[in-house]
Amino acid sequence: MKREGLDFLADNPLYTKRFAIYVGRRCRQATIKDIADELNLHWETVKTLEMQYMRAQLARAGTPAPKAIGIDEISIRKGHNYRIVVSDLIRGRPIWFGGEDRKEASMLQFYDWLGEKKTRGLRLAVMDMWKPFHNATVARAPQAAILFDKFHIMKHLGDALDTVRKAEYRRLSGRDRSYIKGQKYTLLSRRENLSLQGRQALKKVLAANKRLNTAYLLRESFGQLWDYEREGWARRFFENWRASLKWQRLKPYEEFAAMIERHWDGIAAYCKPENKVSLGFVEGLNNKIRVIQRRAYGLRDEEYLRLKVLTCMLPRL
């Protein structure tokens, strides 16, 4: 007896490839449970068909040979359990998901996967100021310029502002304290993202507390650093910004300025024309991954999560 293979059948022989593609497309906008209920299928069947669809997407996308990469980590569950995500910044898609943590050995796994020839083709690596990522990249791709991500740097400055807010809340009492209470989101958000009510609350807080007003204005002005096209101008701006901290009694800001000084080369690299890439892609990808994780809540299949992350920016089949 000879068993004949039929090309139109999916990996699960009870369904056709066309049906598997339909299920995969539907799962891009809805949860497995929703699609299972809609099609009257077991959720494990829907998950299997979607994974087949995502593997077909990756096969069509081909093997990457990136010139500029973005490196970040995501938490996959509680307890400091991390995986590393590497993206091709020029093509705008994640290309690698792996590692056991966010240590240097895990980062080296990416370069092993990419291969020596393609690693030599890297020209830029964008990352946060996490030392293991930096060390692994310098070791394997010394020709690549290293650029520290603006959004992570501004997050550190936002944390410094929040530390000032907490210190002021502890220092004050009565009516002066009431202006600060419950205004963390208002202070840490960009002004253009606030509602009319939020802007009014911000104006009231800044008018009531001089130190918070100074800290807020310093944080808002620091973002100009990435507008300069020459390192000398950027350096002059930073020196002036740092000098303005004198006599302000803003210790968290002084610690932030010292951190910028230690990592200056990776920040000033953005001034070079060849390093002008979209710095918002990695942050946007992180937001997308958080949505994926919420939709897949309860699933412990890491391979499924890996496929979801790697295909989230690919066109549908």
Image (cartoon, rainbow, N blue to C red):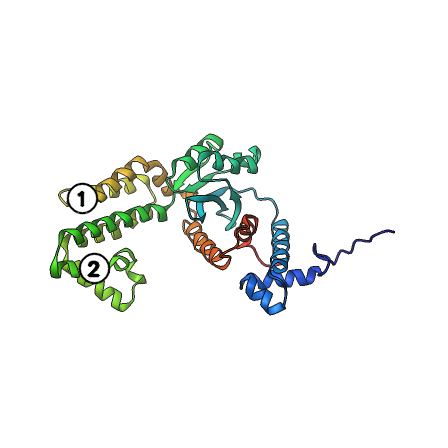
Q: Nearer the viewer, residue 181 or 280?
A: 181
Residue 52 position within the rendered picture, expressed as x and y whole percent measured from the top left: 64, 54
Mark 2 residue element: loop
Residue 129 position within the rendered picture, expressed as x and y whole percent measured from the top left: 37, 40
- Please give the count of numbered marks on the rendered protein: 2
For label 2, the crowd category at 10 Å Cα-Cα, with few meaning under 14, some 14 to 19 and many 20 or more, is: few
Is 127 on the left-hand or right-hand side of 92?
left
- The residue that mark 2 highlights is 181
Q: Nearer the viewer, residue 184 or 42?
A: 42
Q: Indicate the quadrant where residue 37 lies.
A: bottom right
Residue 161 vertical position relative to residue 274 in the rendered view, above or below: below
Q: Quadrant of the C terminus?
A: bottom right
The image's mark for residue 168 is: none
At 44% from the left and 39% from the top, the residue drawn is 102
Is 222 on the left-hand or right-hand side of 282?
left
Q: Amino acid at mark 1?
A: Leu
Is 204 on the left-hand or right-hand side of 271?
left
Residue 271 position within the rendered picture, expressed as x and y whole percent measured from the top left: 36, 42
Residue 100 position within the rendered picture, expressed as x and y whole percent measured from the top left: 49, 40
The image's mark for residue 245 is: 1
For label 1, the crowd category at 10 Å Cα-Cα, with few meaning under 14, some 14 to 19 and many 20 or more, is: some
Alpha carbon distance from label 2 to label 1: 25 Å
Residue 154 vertical position relative to residue 179 in the rendered view, above or below: above
At 28% from the left and 58% from the top, the residue drawn is 185
Q: Nearer the viewer, residue 18 or 4?
A: 4
Badge 2 or badge 1: first in the primary sequence: 2
Q: Amino acid at mark 2?
A: Lys
Mark 1 residue element: loop
Residue 264 visible in the picture:
yes
Residue 71 visible in the picture:
no
Residues at discs 2 and 1 in contact (Cβ within 8 Å): no
